[in-house]
Image (cartoon, rainbow, N blue to C red):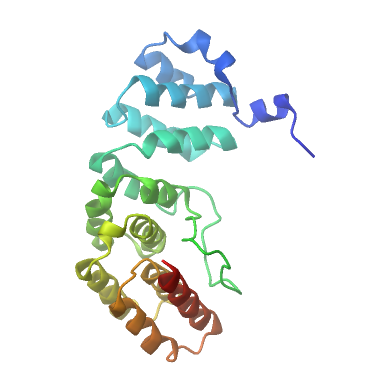
Amino acid sequence: MKSSKNDLIKRGWFDESQISKFLNLDLNSLLNLLKSDKPNERSIASFLLGVKFNVNNKEIYKSLIDALLNESALYARIEISKVLEKGDCSVAEYMVNFLAKIGNNQYKKLPKKVSKKVSYPLPRDIIARILGKMDKANFCILIYSLTKCTTEQLHELLDSIGFMIFYNPSLVNLKNFNIIIGLFNKYKDDEIMVWKLITVLSAFNIGESKLFLLKTKDNFSNKVLVLECERSLRLICTK
């Protein structure tokens, strides 16, 4: 059943007609509006912060993350995410600290089957999703963070890294490939890590990635890992 306009507003949806009375608000007023008890006003505050100000302002991106930590309205979360995606390396580095801390839909164990999609899986962790959609100039922060994260955070960071590489072919090179292979060797006993690393390799349309997957898949006893290798190989071949 199609949602009514009132239902959408309760989830944080807004249109142009609702923005006009907030257009002249200054920075402090918009930051306060982020705390409104009306979801659509929180969405509007996020939207206007992104339009009128620079998200790389520390006060702005920290306030947006604070809001995201407690935000339950779908469209408000989307608007916050859109603004944060425009951030630079300082924003990305700060956001890494919040991987695996928002929501509870992150993978805690291997799925029973692999995705049938012919694209890179959208990260389930909301911070990982934002990081993966940021400008590729922030990729250095994702790689740097590999040695700074907890294991739980690293599970989500890999989703960001794979997503960014998949949609930015210029990041496909032997240096980055070898970083991923190094993680295979380091975390070979962590099934979730191995599964996600296999998915990351689907972004590397190079012979080394194909060869590694072909050689590795026969070593797995877990059927899901074998199927994920096969899926990654299919993605590589169709890119």
On the image, the x and y values in percent for residue 115 come to 56, 67
Placement of 109 over or under 119, stated as above or below: below
Q: Extreme right residue here?
A: 1
On the image, the x and y values in percent for residue 204 come to 33, 69
Placement of 90 over or under 187, stated as above or below: above
On the image, the x and y values in percent for residue 77 come to 51, 37
16 vs 54, nearest the viewer: 16
Left or right: residue 198 compared with residue 55: right
**Image quadrant in which you'd find residue 86:** top left
Please name the residue shown 45% across and 11% down the image: 23
Please name the residue shown 32% across and 55% down the image: 168
Left or right: residue 68 compared with residue 184: right
Q: How many marks?
A: 0
**Image quadrant in which you'd find residue 189:** bottom left
Quarter of the figure with the C terminus? bottom left
On the image, the x and y values in percent for residue 59 come to 30, 27
Quarter of the figure with the N terminus? top right
Q: Extreme left residue here?
A: 175
Please name the residue shown 49% across and 61% down the image: 119
Q: Extreme front residue here?
A: 238
48 vs 174, nearest the viewer: 174
* Residue 148 in sight from this viewpoint: no
Left or right: residue 43 compared with residue 137: right
* Residue 83 in sight from this viewpoint: yes
Left or right: residue 216 compared with residue 173: right
Placement of 144 over or under 205, stated as above or below: above
